[in-house]
Image (cartoon, rainbow, N blue to C red):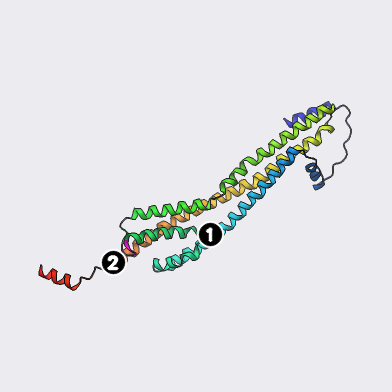
Amino acid sequence: MVLFSVLALFFLQEDPVSTPPVAAGSSALGEMVHNSGPVAFAVLLLLLAASIFSWTIMFSKWSSFRKATMQSQRFIRAFRKSGRLSELASVADQFKPSPLVAVFTEIHDEYQRQTGGRGLPRNPIALERAAQTASSEALTAMESRMTWLATIAAIAPFIGLFGTVMGIIDAFHGLGTAGAATLRAVAPGISEALITTAAGLVVAIPAVVGYNQLTARLREFGSRMDDFGRELLNAIENAAMANPPAAPIPTPDESARRRTF
């Protein structure tokens, strides 16, 4: 629609005059931003704030996910080298940024409640539910503020388009007031209005890429937690079968009573 309007004004212009060369680079862009109307300027400020907020979220998530990955690798190595779960439980807080620690702690606590730390678990399904609950809670915590990133990625182009539409309306209103149907009269206003659309795309594209990358990392963390939960349950069952609980030693009174009967 904008292109058709510009072409129509080009063919309707009364006195085609060669336009002076526009300053290249940042000077022309800065001049157009400076000459933007109040609506376009407000839209640019809103998009700038959204861009800063989205980049803050992305840098924060990338940093926290990198720490979680490093601590998860260290925790897995410590888990596979450890001979007893109680020893690993005493040092699990050292690997706290890792979401695997929450899964281990929940399973270990449930196993302690069931058996006191020895023997096969009485209710293995409860251990599986504890692992799923811990994994879900860890993922929920890691997904915090991700909805803001998705929202910015979705609405930034429309905010920029709103500024463009309002700028074009102002340009054509000024053209009708001036009464000069020339491309030279309307082109500056349209070019200033289109800046908001470009700004909206500049804000939305990195947010979309960052959201997709972070979502892929979250799926990877979810898979790692599920795999670790199954590995931990297998380790508990194997250790319990290899070291069954010793039979209780009867007291002297019990021995005499049994011999009497």
Q: Amino acid at mark 2?
A: Pro
Please state the horizontal and vertical placement of residue 88, each as a whole percent of the image.
43, 67
Report whether residue 198 is seen. Answer: no
Residue 133, compared with residue 32, is above or below; it is below
Label at residue 99: none
- Residue at 61%, 49% (x, y): give it: 210
- Residue at 75%, 37% (x, y): give it: 193
Q: Secondary structure at mark 2?
A: loop
Please state the horizontal and vertical placement of residue 82, each as a whole percent of the image.
42, 68
Q: Secondary structure at mark 1?
A: helix
Q: Earlier in the sequence, mark 2 or mark 1?
A: 1
Boundaries of the magenta span: 115-119
Bin the neighbour count of mark 1 within 10 Å (Cα to Cα): few under 14, some 14-19, many 20 and up: many
Q: Amino acid at mark 1?
A: Ala
Q: Quadrant of residue 121?
A: bottom left
Q: Are marks 2 and 1 in contact (CB under 8 Å)?
A: no
Report whether residue 111 is seen. Answer: yes
Left or right: 76 in relation to 246: right
The dominant secondary structure in magenta is loop
Quadrant of the snapshot with the C terminus: bottom left
Label at residue 68: 1
Please state the horizontal and vertical placement of residue 1, each as a whole percent of the image.
72, 30
Bin the neighbour count of mark 2 within 10 Å (Cα to Cα): few under 14, some 14-19, many 20 and up: few
Q: Nearer the viewer, residue 169 or 246?
A: 169
Left or right: 162 in relation to 88: right
Q: What residue is shown with label 2?
A: 245
Task: Say if the magenta span includes residue 76.
Answer: no
The residue at the far bottom in this view is 252
- Residue at 74%, 39% (x, y): give it: 40
